[in-house]
Image: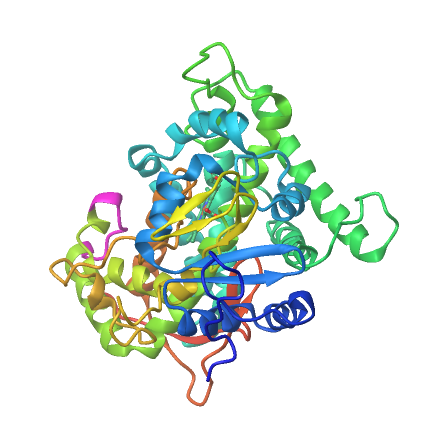
Amino acid sequence: MNSLTTQASHPGLPPGPPAHLWGLNHLRSMKADYLGFVSDLQQAHPDIAHVQVLNEHITHVFNPDWVREILVDQAAHLIRWERATEVFSIAMGQSVLVTEGAQWQRQRRMLQPGFTPKRVAGYADLMVSAAQYALDALTAQGAGQSVNMDELMTDMTLDVILKALFGAHRVANARPVSEAIQTLSHSGVSELFKLFSWPLWMPLPAVRRVRHAKQSLDRIIQQHIQAQQSNAHDDGQDLLTMLRLARDPEHPDQGLSAQELHDQTMVMFQAGHETTATAMTWWSGLIARHPEVAERIHAEVDTVLQGQAPTPSTLQQLPWLQASLKEAMRLYPPAAVLFTRRACKPITAGPWTVPQGHLIAFTPYVIQRDARWFESPDQFKPERFLPGAPEIPRGTWMPFGTGPRVCIGQHFAMMEMGLIAAMLLQRYKLQWPAGDAWPAGDLGVTLRPATPIRLHLQPRGPL
Ligand code: HEM
């Protein structure tokens, strides 16, 4: 019997595993292997489960209809778990990722126009030139190299987000920026399991590292904001210009305050870079492990693009490429766990009611590997997402979340990933090194490979 099997320990609440020592047994398992813990929980309780840890009641919802019922229909009665927003606000200030209520609504209204599919298509040239730059540098290093894909994808996506944010103003050396983002991201996760965070002025080595990382990002953002403000031209296509000129549609005389502008730029920096790099790293590994899928994509990329750089419209003609990206994010969603929510009112989940004050957890990594919706759920099968394949039930694929707080950058990310993937496969065959084992996942702010994915990049001849 699974140790997490049904026990109706709390009358009226969904079943769940018994808590020993006030749930410290669960806390230990969650800290050791969070995704393993939640996967076991879902095996024992396929739709919903209740877990108690210390004084918190946490309901895990796996049924996709109930997930939507909560995150879409009852979003107004939820806030994000206070400890998570407290931790994330250290790095991201009072940005759209962490604010709630009227403040969040106002910020989201103002930012949304910068992320519509049409607006995002305007960033395609910047994305292509960033990918071109990185791939040219790789080609210059010579044929048949072994490449750390995480590093390559991190460099490329950082360049993309820097160009999209600041336009022509390049950051001379992106490596310290990337390291600062990683420092903040790692500290964020370890802080989550602590009861409180030290203030940033504390003279402790770990705190000092975070403070320096934050200060170095603050400086870069401030430099760019000031550079733009002293520039008379207001017609830039970059995100920072969009943020500077954004007005609240309900109060057209109001823009973002100086602090808000800074914080929103910071969040785009962080949320818009590590997630995409992680998705592309897993994708490249999966393509290398599945040459039969790679062949299909090579064929369609060659036929449709004829050696030209991809565009937003030619990307739409590459169904295998698009399907492979979706399938990679099904198996390895970068945001494997959504922000846990707190119920501000009783919340309905199918036949159950989650009482006010309880926490509700959503885990795309587990929901997206449910054999009820995905046959052979642990296998990489992009054909599930091809046009004409049997329809995938709503709410079972949710790497960008769902409801009003769905990822604001989802079109941006899908286009960026499509462009980079197409350009990479135009130039190279991705080969998995013989004898290398497939890496396990390592859950931080994103789900990264626990050991680096290194691939052999074999140049392809001209068309
Ligand atoms: C593959 C890439 C990406 C993935 C998988 C991803 C995933 C997510 C998810 C799951 C959420 C919702 C979290 C929740 O509901 O708890 C989210 C929110 C958010 N994402 Fe993304 N994201 C990606 C790329 C981007 C990019 C490129 C940007 C910006 C340029 C971005 C900016 C944001 C922001 C600002 C939010 C907060 C939205 C709000 O709360 O209103 N993301 N993302």
Name the foreground residue: 324 vs 29: 29
Q: Residue at x 31, y 38 (%)?
A: 121
Residue 332 is inside the magenta segment = no
Quarter of the image for the C terminus: give it. Answer: bottom left
**Residue at the front extreme of this rendering:** 11
Q: Residue at x 20, y 49 (%)?
A: 316
Name the foreground residue: 193 vs 232: 193
Is the residue 327 above or below the residue 84 in the image? Answer: below
Most common secondary structure along the magenta stretch? loop
Q: Relative to residue 442, is residue 219 drawn left or right?
A: right
**Residue at the right extreme of this rendering:** 203
Residue 441 place in picture, x, y as percent: 50, 71
The answer, for residue 225, to whether it is visible in the render is: yes
Q: Relative to residue 85, is residue 242 drawn left or right?
A: left
Residue 66 place in picture, x, y as percent: 34, 52
Q: Residue at x 45, y 60 (%)?
A: 14
Is the residue 322 above or below the residue 4 in the image? Answer: above
**Residue at the top extreme of this rendering:** 253
Count of marks placed on residues: 0
Is the residue 413 above or below the residue 288 in the image? Answer: above
Name the foreground residue: 183 vs 10: 10
Residue 249 place in picture, x, y as percent: 41, 17
Residues rendered magenta in the picture: 305-313
Residue 312 is inside the magenta segment = yes
| Quarter where residue 118 is shown | top left
**Residue at the left extreme of this rendering:** 388
